[in-house]
Image: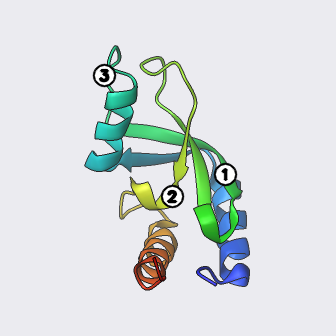
Amino acid sequence: MIDNPDRVERLLAKLQAALPLPARVTPELAAMLQANNTATNIPSTCSITWLSYAGDEGGIMCRLDFGQECGSAVVVSITHLRFDARLPLARDITAYQKHRVKRLRHQPS
């Protein structure tokens, strides 16, 4: 099991209560989104408007709102996002991200 179900449930409840959340996309995610939508410039910041847990396969999934710049809905794992350290939940999010990435690295191929 990659995620601790109790921890994820508590974090998800905190995140849901704080919506919408500001976030920044990683350079890798921005490049992938840009490749899929060459007509639109993808901004580096976005707002998380919806959250769900997709189990060990996907983790905490976030719907991103880029405003008027990007017409289609984008749903990504929270591990592909970065958060301002001054955000009240930043520590909890970063701890989840680090734990998840570490566990994914140790999964057999």
The image's colouring method is: rainbow
- The relative height of residue 57 versus residue 80 in the rendered view (above or below) is below
Which residue appears at 51% of the width and 18% of the height?
71
Q: Quadrant of the N terminus?
A: bottom right
Task: Specify which label sits upstream in the sequence, 2 or 1.
Answer: 1
Residue type, mark 2 in image: Ile
Residue 51's label in the rendered image is 1
Which residue appears at 66% of the width and 74% of the height?
8
Comparing 87 with 8, the one in front is 8
Query: How many neighbours does mark 3 have within 10 angstroms: few (below 14), some (14-19), or many (20 or more)?
Result: few
Which residue appears at 51% of the width and 58% of the height?
78
Residue 108's label in the rendered image is none
Q: Is residue 81 visible?
A: yes
In the structure shown, which secondary structural element does the residue marked by tag 3 occupy?
loop
In the structure shown, which secondary structural element does the residue marked by tag 2 occupy?
helix
- The relative height of residue 8 versus residue 47 in the rendered view (above or below) is below
Whether residues under marks 2 and 1 lie with C-beta atoms below 8 angstroms apart, the answer is: yes
Real-space Cα separation, disc 2 to disc 3, in angstroms: 21 Å
Give the mark count. 3
Which residue is under mark 3?
41
Residue type, mark 1 in image: Leu
Q: Is residue 59 visible?
A: no
Residue type, mark 3 in image: Asn
78 lies left or right of 37: right
